[in-house]
C-alpha cells in the first residue's frame, strides 16, 4: 500500500494521530513519566483538523490538567479518610463547575472534573507524584500533537476554504441558471450545509491568520469571497420566493450571456409581461456578485500557485 492509498484508506489526520501517540509514548519512557497514558490521551485530543481547533484543544487540556490536579491533590490531602472522599468529590465538582462557569469556560467542565476525580480517587502511593505525572504527561502530549500537526502535512485551511468556495460557487451558478430557465429550482436549501461549513472554515482561517507559522494570505479578499457567496445564497432564496413570471430585461440577458456563454433570448421572450423592476434588480445584483466572486476565487488560486511555486506555501 503506497502513501496515497494509505491516506485515502484512513485519512491524514488518523495517520498523524498515530504518529503523535507513538512518539509521545517513547518520550514518556525517555522522561520517565510513570503514566504514559496521559501523554497519549493529550496527543490524541490535540490533533484537530485546523490549527484554530488545535490551539483551543491544547488550552483546554493544559488548563483542565492543572486545575483538576491542584484541586484533586489538595482535596486528597485534606480528606484522607476513604469515608469522606465521596463527599469531598461532590463538593469539589460543584466548586469546579461554578468556577468554570464564572470564567466562561464551560467546555472545560467535563475534562476538569474527570481529572479532579482521578487525582482524588487514585490508589497511587503518592497523590502528589500522580498529579505531577498527570500535568507533565498532558503538557508533553499536547506539545507532541501540536508539532506533529504542524510539521507533517500542515492543515491547509486557506486552501480548503478556496476549494469549498469554488465548489459552492459552481453549485449556486447552476442553481441560478435552473431558476432563470425553469422558473423555480427544485430546492434552494440543498446547499445550506455546505454554506454553513464554509462559514466555519472562514472563521478558522481568520483565527489562524495571525499565527507566525501560517502563510500570509489576503484576508480581505477571502472575507469578500465569503460575503459574496452568502449574498448569492440569500438572493437565490429571495428570487425563489418571488418567482419568475415576468420578463428578464435586456441588461440582465447580456449579463447571463456573458457569465454562462448561453443565450436565453427565446426563454425570456415567452412572456408578454413587462420586465419586473424589483425582480430584475435582485437578479442584476446577484449576477454582478457572481462575476465578482469568480474573479476573486481565480485571483486567490493564482496567488496560492505563486506561493507554492516560489516556496512560500
Image (spheres, grey):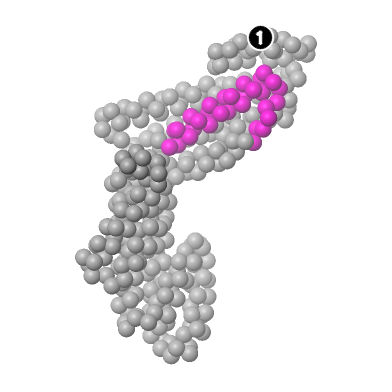
Which type of secondary structure does the marked residue at label 1 adopt? helix
Q: In which quarter of the image is the N terminus?
A: top left
User: What secondary structure predominates along the stretch shown in magenta?
Assistant: helix
Which residues are the magenta region?
160-189
Where is residue 70 drawn, in percent x and y?
Answer: 38, 75
Position of residue 9 relative to residue 294, above or below, is below
Q: Is residue 79 left or right of residue 195?
A: left
Q: In this view, does 258 lie to the left or right of 29?
A: right
Q: Nearer the viewer, residue 65 or 227?
A: 65
Q: Which of 293 and 181 is in front in this view?
A: 181
Q: Residue furthest right?
A: 272
Q: Residue at x 71, y 19 (%)?
A: 277
Residue 212: tell me if it is visible: no
Query: Which residue does the numbered mark 1 point to in the structure image?
Result: 265
Where is residue 82 drawn, in percent x and y?
Answer: 45, 88
**For residue 251: magenta?**
no
Where is residue 29 drawn, in percent x and y?
Answer: 24, 66
Q: Quadrant of the C terminus?
A: top left
* Number of marks drawn: 1
Q: Which residue lies furthest to the left in this view?
A: 30
Q: Quadrant of residue 76?
A: bottom left
Judge the density around disc 1: few (<14), some (14-19), many (≥20) Cα neighbours within 10 Å.
Answer: few
Position of residue 106 relative to residue 290, above or below, is below
Q: Which residue is drawn at 57% across and 40% down?
A: 193
Position of residue 122 relative to residue 283, above or below, is below
Residue 195: tell me if it is visible: yes
Amino acid at each position: 500500500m503506497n502513501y496515497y492509498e494509505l491516506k485515502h484508506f484512513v485519512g491524514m489526520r488518523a495517520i498523524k494521530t498515530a504518529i503523535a501517540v507513538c512518539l509521545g509514548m517513547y518520550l514518556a519512557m525517555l522522561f520517565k513519566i510513570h503514566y504514559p497514558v496521559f501523554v497519549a490521551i493529550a496527543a490524541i485530543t490535540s490533533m484537530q483538523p485546523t490549527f484554530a481547533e488545535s490551539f483551543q484543544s491544547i488550552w483546554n487540556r493544559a488548563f483542565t490538567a492543572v486545575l483538576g490536579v491542584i484541586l484533586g491533590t489538595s482535596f486528597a490531602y485534606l480528606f484522607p479518610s476513604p469515608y469522606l472522599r465521596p463527599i469531598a468529590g461532590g463538593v469539589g465538582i460543584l466548586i469546579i463547575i461554578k468556577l468554570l462557569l464564572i470564567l466562561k469556560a464551560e467546555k472545560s467542565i467535563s475534562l476538569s472534573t474527570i481529572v479532579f476525580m482521578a487525582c482524588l480517587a487514585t490508589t497511587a502511593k503518592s497523590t502528589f507524584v500522580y498529579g505531577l505525572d498527570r500535568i507533565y504527561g498532558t503538557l508533553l502530549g499536547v506539545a507532541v500533537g501540536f508539532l506533529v500537526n504542524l510539521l507533517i502535512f500542515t492543515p491547509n485551511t486557506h486552501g480548503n476554504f478556496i476549494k469549498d468556495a469554488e465548489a459552492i460557487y459552481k453549485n449556486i451558478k447552476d442553481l441560478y441558471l435552473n431558476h432563470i430557465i425553469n422558473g423555480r429550482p427544485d430546492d434552494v436549501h440543498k446547499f445550506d450545509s455546505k454554506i454553513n461549513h464554509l462559514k466555519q472554515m472562514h472563521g478558522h482561517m481568520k483565527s489562524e491568520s495571525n499565527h507566525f507559522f501560517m502563510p500570509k494570505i489576503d484576508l480581505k479578499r477571502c472575507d469578500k469571497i465569503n460575503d459574496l457567496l452568502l449574498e448569492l445564497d440569500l438572493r437565490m432564496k429571495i428570487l425563489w420566493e418571488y418567482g419568475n413570471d415576468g420578463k428578464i430585461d435586456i441588461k440582465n440577458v447580456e449579463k447571463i450571456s456573458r457569465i454562462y456563454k448561453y443565450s436565453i433570448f427565446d426563454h425570456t421572450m415567452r412572456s408578454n409581461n413587462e420586465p419586473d423592476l424589483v425582480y430584475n434588480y435582485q437578479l442584476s445584483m446577484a449576477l454582478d456578485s457572481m462575476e465578482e466572486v469568480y474573479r476573486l476565487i481565480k485571483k486567490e488560486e493564482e496567488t496560492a500557485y505563486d506561493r507554492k511555486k516560489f516556496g512560500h506555501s
